[in-house]
Image (cartoon, rainbow, N blue to C red):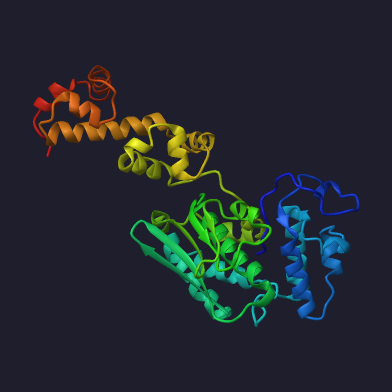
Amino acid sequence: MPLHAPDRPARPATRAPASPLLAAPQAATPMAFVQAIVRAYEQRGLSPEQALKTAQIAPEIVRDSTQRITALQMELLSGAAMQELDDEALGWFERRLPWGSYGMLARASISAPTLGVALKRWCRHHGLIASDVQLQTSEQGNRASITLQEHRALGPLREFCLVSVLRNIHGLACWLIDSRLPLLQAQFPFAAPPHASVYPLLFPGPVGFEAPLARIDFDARYLHMPLRRDEAALQQMLQRALPLTVLQYRRDRLLVQRVRQLLVSQPQDTQSAEALAHWLHISPRTLHRQLKEEGASLQSLKDEVRRDRATELLLRTHKPIKQVAEAAGFRNEKSFIRAFRDWTGHSPAEFRRQPDPA
């Protein structure tokens, strides 16, 4: 599975007229990744001419690092190169990964009960077919990580290798649970390249360079989500697996839980949609849209958190109603009493006089 960036406006990478298939839209995929594939051909003493032609990339512009190509062009180039070189790793490793190797890893993972188990299988089996690097998943508190340890010098293909391997496993993880998997951070053990601006498109979230090793971090709760794919879905996906590396899922099956947790843990910093979206590394518009897709709304989640907080304080403490209202996030006591009556059918004072359900 190759690497390419999501499409966005950019300069064209071909000088010949593009076919309708390749004409729109133009993209941000840097020429550095095309150059890496060309190097893979050179290592084998072969010519990339036919693969470049398939992707409609003019050979004379490959050396121009300022150029960009579309995601579809990168998909076509990578697919052609993998088959011509019979190497799905595109020259990254000492040993070729014959066509179908990554499909085999996916099949070994598809029967896992949770994403965490599936990723552990993928990482373990990847080490069996490519000992040059070691992938590992870990979980510490509410943070999960996938790290990539290098066991040999990867040479001029190093960046393309590290970025591709991590992007591939991230894309597969999203597909397995049919959900976005937002990243808390992505880090790489090299200096920021000239095309560093493309990294946030490949790894949405904070991106850092000159780190000890390559890694991506995300909310650990995703590890415990069940897989939503079966063998039939896998067979269909493998017919065109390459777009997994660029597909950004709209649905986030954990978004409701993440929003609820932030509303509880950061009440003063998440009072507006803009502030909450900032914590989640998405736009306010995306926040509202994805919550709607999950059958929720920001206001309903705020009301739920406020209700739970108020209920706990009314039952477990002797705080005056005014202080309970403030602690639950209300500006005044009257609005709190009105909202609480809508939630429970009782005023806060009436609710407090009821027998403790515990």
Query: x%, y% of residue 264?
Result: 31, 40
In this rendering, the count of numbered labels is 0
Query: x%, y% of residue 75?
Result: 73, 59
Q: Quadrant of residue 271?
A: top left
Where 195 falls versus 26 (above or below)? below
Q: Nearer the viewer, residue 303 or 83?
A: 303
Where 5 falls versus 282 (above or below)? below
Location of the N terminus by quadrant is bottom right
Q: Nearer the viewer, residue 127 or 148?
A: 148
Q: Nearer the viewer, residue 16 or 224?
A: 16
Residue 352 seen from this side: yes
Residue at 9% from the left image edge and 25% from the top image edge? 353
Location of the C terminus by quadrant is top left
Residue 98 seen from this side: no
Residue at 65% from the left image edge and 82% from the top image edge? 95
Query: x%, y% of residue 291?
Result: 46, 37
Taking the image as shown, residue 29 lies to the left or right of residue 22, namely left
Residue at 27% from the left image edge and 25% from the top image edge? 343
Query: x%, y% of residue 206?
Result: 52, 53
Q: Quadrant of residue 311?
A: top left
Taking the image as shown, residue 33 lies to the left or right of residue 151, namely right
